[in-house]
Amino acid sequence: MVCLACLLPLFLVPIVNVLPLLFYFILGKIYGLLGWEYRKPERAPPACPYKPQTQKDDQ
């Protein structure tokens, strides 16, 4: 027997990943009804959380 709390993340992850697409789809339909053009905003590329320290050359 597997507890339901352990299975919950398996179902939540795909739902959370679809939310932005659903949001853009709904906004596109609303803008279309109003006669406007909806363009998705450009997303920033993922940044690396680790930034190596710059080495100083003291020669």
Image: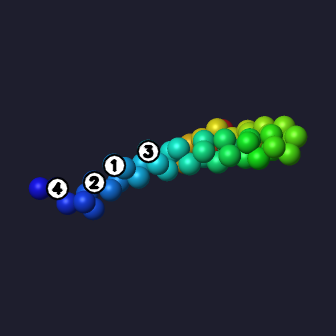
Quadrant placement of the C terminus: top right
Quarter assignment of residue 6 = bottom left
Residue occupying image coordinates x 37% and y 50%? 11
Asked whether residue 37 appears in the rendered view, the answer is: yes
- Answer yes or no: do the residues labelled 3 and 2 have beta carbons within 8 Å? no
* Residue shown at the point (88%, 40%) measured from the top left: 35
Q: What's the amino acid at mark 4?
A: Val
Numbered badge on residue 10: 1
Residue 14: assigned label:
3
- Of all residues, the one furthest to the left in this rendering is 1
Marks 1 and 4: in contact by CB < 8 Å? Answer: no
Local crowd size for mark 3, using a 10 Å CA cut-off: few (<14), some (14–19), many (≥20)? few
Front residue of this view, candidates 4 and 43: 4
Element assignment for label 4:
loop
Q: Position of residue 37 (x, y in %)?
A: 84, 37
- Residue 37: mark in rendering: none
| Amino acid identity at mark 3 | Pro
**Residue at the right extreme, as displayed:** 35
State whether residue 2 is above or below residue 35: below
Q: Are marks 2 and 1 in contact (CB under 8 Å)?
A: yes
Q: CA distance from mark 4 to mark 2?
A: 8 Å
Task: Please tell me whether mark 1 sits on a helix, a strand or a loop.
Answer: helix
Q: CA distance from mark 1 to mark 3?
A: 8 Å
Q: Position of residue 31 (x, y in %)?
A: 80, 44
Q: Earlier in the sequence, mark 3 or mark 4?
A: 4
Residue toward you, 29 or 44: 29
Residue type of the residue flagged with mark 1: Leu
Q: Which mark is residue 7?
A: 2
Chain-order first, disc 3 or disc 2: 2
- Of mark 4 and mark 2, the one earlier in the sequence is 4
Q: Which residue is mark 4?
A: 2
Q: Nearer the viewer, residue 36 or 17?
A: 36
